[in-house]
Amino acid sequence: MSFHFYLYRAPAGSGPMTRWERMLAEPLGTVGEVKEQLAALFPQVNWTRHQSPLDATSDERETWFGMGPHGAALPYIDILLNEDAPGQVHFVVLNKAPPSVMRQIVSALSLSDVSAPESGDLVDLDGYTDEDRYFAKKPWP
């Protein structure tokens, strides 16, 4: 089981992000742009901003946390958006996300891959349902 899922767009055949020697994920936009796209999908999510300095001489970067909704009929959503230099988001990070939520985000943002860093695997979003306990692994070269 994985608790963190990284959703991103990368060249075909890139494999899981934990195997990369350099950044292969394409920028998805600014924090504001990506947050706006996600808020359109999940308007019931509450967003909170956290700023922390990269180091003593650099500008601050933004991290946004999206939590919600709080209702039995709605899926649990826990999102992290981290601004990478220079002001771009490369990953939508979801914690304990059901595949139905990940499918919506992958489709809406035209993403290519979902990686489970704890196991070093790619996730096959069509290989399991929200009721399954474990995610399905996607084969890669």
Image: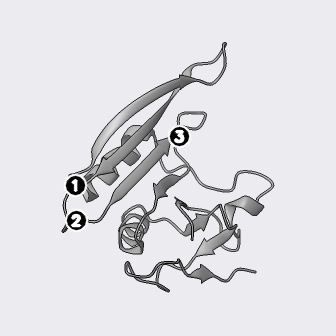
What percent of the width, then of the height, locates residue 65? 40, 42
What percent of the width, then of the height, locates residue 87? 53, 34
Q: Which amino acid, by three-letter code, is at mark 1?
A: His
Instruction: Kindly check if marks 1 and 2 are in contact, taking CB atoms under 8 A apart as contact.
Output: yes
Left or right of 99? Residue 139 is right
Residue that label 2 marks: 74
Name the N-terminal-most of marks 1 and 3.
1
Disc 3: CA contacts within 10 A as few (<14), some (14-19) or many (>=20): many
Disc 2: CA contacts within 10 A as few (<14), some (14-19) or many (>=20): few
Rendered image quadrant of residue 132:
bottom left
Foreground disc of the pair 1, 3? 1
Q: Which mark is residue 103?
A: none
Work out whether residue 47 or residue 84 is closer to the camera in this orientation and state it: 47
Q: Which amino acid, by three-letter code, is at mark 3?
A: Gln
Residue that label 3 marks: 88
Residue pictured at 28% horizontal, 50% vertical: 39
Work out whether residue 111 or residue 92 is closer to the camera in this orientation and state it: 92
Disc 1: CA contacts within 10 A as few (<14), some (14-19) or many (>=20): few
Please, is residue 14 above or below residue 59 in the view? below
Instruction: Kindly check if marks 1 and 3 are in contact, taking CB atoms under 8 A apart as contact.
Output: no
Residue that label 1 marks: 70
The residue most toward the bottom is 127
Please, is residue 101 above or below residue 36 in the view? below
Report the number of discs: 3
Q: What is the spatial separation of the Cα atoms under label 1 and label 2, in whole angstroms? A: 7 Å
Label 1 element class: loop
